[in-house]
Amino acid sequence: MNVLMISAKFPYPATRGGTEIRTFYCLEALKAEHHVTLLTFREDYVTDAEVEALQAHVDELVVFDAPQNAAPGLAAKLNRLAGFVTTGTPPNIHYYYSDAVQAWVDEAIAQNRFDAITCEHSVNALYIRPEWKEKVRTVINVHSSDYCTKRSNLDLGITDNVWRDRLTLPLLRRYESDTYRKFTTVAVTTADDETQIQEMVAGLHSVIIPNGVDLEEFSFRTTEPAGRQLIFTGTFDYSVNIDTALYLAQEIFPQVQARYPEATLAIVGNRPADCVKTLADRPGIIVTGRVPSLADALHQSALFIAPMRAGYGIKNKTLEAMAAGVPIVGSDRALEGLDIGDLPTEATSQEPAPHPLRALRANSTDEFVTAIFQLFEDPNLRQSLAHNSRVYMERSFTWTKLGEQYRQAVTG
């Protein structure tokens, strides 16, 4: 088959994080058996070497310059909001719309160049016309629902503009509902995501395809590091990760420091917002920005702590920590889509558990602090979680296995 993949985000290297990881490995899976054309945008940070390297992973690479940054200032923001209200297209979606790209895609479809089109995330769906579903397979790979995330943020009060988000929430729901109807198949990462989307569009054809992890890049560490470093990873210009970093640093970590003064907290990942950068002014907290090797940063940390309060979809950061053998304490949101197993009971403590424990779950400050203390004091539990998590990743979350599922969704 000839497949057109549309990705607003330049999906290379996969180590950059965010949606780029899933997009890259889905691309690799398609390329293994089909002729793939990738249409993408080039941001300022993308190098010539990265463009050249990505060309080796596709049959045809079509690159457009990314749009200019949105105009700053209150008037510009109000204009964008007014545009959302009048057109029904969210500003972050409209930002990536290009007449030149639309013309390129329209011409390609008119010439019957492709048998299938995939859109990586809903930000690319604006280029798809509803009638195309009758002549080519159209698949949208929903990394996560913006509507569900914004609704969750509002419920938790982690939004910088409540009145704006409440005004636009129903518009966003309508936009996503209309978007999903344009596609032959909708791919999601978790059962929770599928339920949310099916509530928007009853009878939608959807498939659950989790994220995966590169088991070579995130190798299992052979020894525990010295010290008591906690780590949380992510891209820190994203509201959910910003909220998590602030909550971890301001509410949970001080209680850990009170008992373990030598403890440190590493906040590791790309593009930290100013409010995240200032956390480094606090004793014991390190904010790194982008690092050469995320796996190395994980290997050097005692525990991975993910008190995420919002955000839907399976979390790459959690899979990576599990693969690397770093014991995890995570919230429901951080552990979404994962079977973390059962605590052994007294009756089964001498037998292998049918669902071995792979992480500790916590959803309040007290629960996180208690779980961290427990892991600091119990090396056997740390080693058990690390081993069980790695085995789980090897069995269920390889990109080879999940790529095959994506290939089947695209080809039908």
Image (cartoon, rainbow, N blue to C red):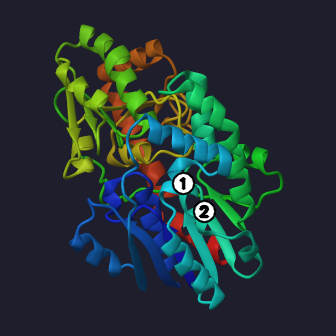
Q: How far apart, in angstroms, are the residues tagged by discs 1 and 2?
A: 9 Å
Report helix, strand or loop for mark 2.
helix
Residue 189 in picture, x, y percent from top left: 58, 52
Q: Is residue 194 above or below residue 152?
A: below
Residue 338 visible? The answer is: no
x then y, percent, for residue 254: 29, 13
At 26% across and 9% down in the image, what residue appears?
259
Instruction: State left or right for residue 77 relative to residue 270.
Output: right
The quadrant holding residue 54 is bottom left
Which residue occupies the extreme top position in the image? 258
Q: Position of residue 122 (x, y in %)?
A: 58, 57
Asked if 308 appears above or below 204 in the picture, the reply is above
| In the image, residue 205 above or below residue 346 | below
Query: How many residues crowd around disc 2 within 10 Å: few (fewer than 14), some, or many (20 or more)?
Result: many
Q: Which sits in the foreground, 101 or 359?
A: 101
**CB of mark 1 within 8 Å of CB of mark 2?**
yes
**Secondary-structure class at tag 1:** helix
- Quick check: can you spot residue 395? yes
Q: Residues within 10 Å of mark 1 (few under 14, many from 20)?
A: some
**Residue highlighted by disc 1:** 93
Quadrant where the image shows the N terminus = bottom right
| Residue 94 image-quadrant placement | bottom right
Q: Which residue is mark 2?
A: 125
Residue at 55% x, 30% y is: 153
Q: Tell me the kind of residue under disc 2.
A: Ala
Q: Is residue 119 left or right of residue 269?
A: right
